[in-house]
Image (cartoon, rainbow, N blue to C red):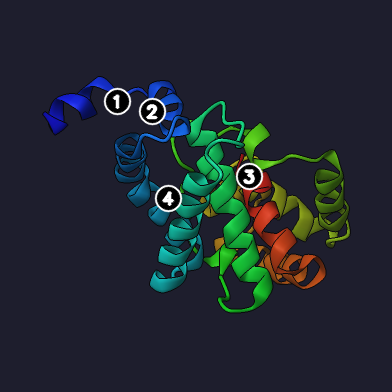
Amino acid sequence: MMTEEITDIADDKQLLDRMKAGDRLAFEVIYSKYWSKLYIYAYNILREKHSCEDIVQEIMTDLWIRRDVLQIESLKAFFLTATRFQVLKVIRSGKVRSDFFTQDHQLPEGYNAEQAIHSKDIISIVDEHISQLPAKCREIFTLSRKEQLSNREIAKKLGIAQKTVENQITIAIRRLRSSLGDVLAFILLFYTIL
């Protein structure tokens, strides 16, 4: 019987509607469907198990408690935004430090620029800091992050050693981290890889 009910309410829209009406089973299906995805998303940034578990638990608890007042069009978008906010909150608190630019981050499927950046002001701040990098450093960083060229491709394109490219990217990342701080560095990560 329970399996049939879960199959009947597998669509996110139906799950949301039933959860808003107080259907605990619908919430449990949402929880089961999204918990591991949110955990992996947070863990790919923080690399700290307990903080990530706490983040997901807080998001899910908040979803259930505020189910009748939340205006959710898409569960996926809601969860990505909520997770990103909670990760920023943890980073801001100083409980966890994250090495944003030294790890490979994969964005979840279906993620788009509108979800990653909500403000033109943030983009202009990031661009301003990038523009303050030394010319060669800025060029290499831009080729790497915005044009998605590999270090080898950049070295070939500019006629320089691959080690020089690696060094310039490291310098750019250090300067941007220093000038932007962790919170804006997190936003910069999303901005530069889109």
Give the SS element for disc 1. Answer: loop
Residue appearing at x 88%, y 52% in the figure: 128
Q: Nearer the viewer, residue 55 or 157?
A: 55
What amino acid is found at the position of numbered circle 3 in the picture? Lys
Disc 2 residue type (three-letter): Leu
Most extreme residue toward the bottom, as rendered? 95
For disc 3, the marked residue is 157
Q: Is residue 164 above or below residue 191?
A: below
Q: Residues within 10 Å of mark 4 (few under 14, many from 20)?
A: many
Instruction: Report the mark closest to the observer, 3 or 2.
Output: 2
Relative side of 149 to 42, left or right: right
Quick one: 105 or 58, which is closer to the camera? Answer: 58
Q: Looking at the image, is mark 4 or mark 3 earlier in the sequence?
A: 4
Residue at figure coordinates x 48%, y 33% from the top left? 75
Mark sitting earlier along the chain (3/2): 2
Upstream in the sequence, badge 1 or badge 4? 1
Q: Which residue is pictured at 21% across the width and 26% down the height? A: 5
User: The N terminus lies in which quarter of the figure?
Assistant: top left
Residue to which mark 2 is pinned: 15
Check the image and name the residue furthest to the front. 22
**Numbered circle sitting on residue 59:** none
Q: Where is residue 151, by image quadrant?
A: bottom right
Number of other residues with Cα within 10 Å of mark 1, as a class: few under 14, some 14 to 19, many 20 or more = some
Residue type at mark 4: give it.
Leu
According to the picture, the residue beneath numbered tag 4 turns out to be 38
Disc 1 designates what residue? 10
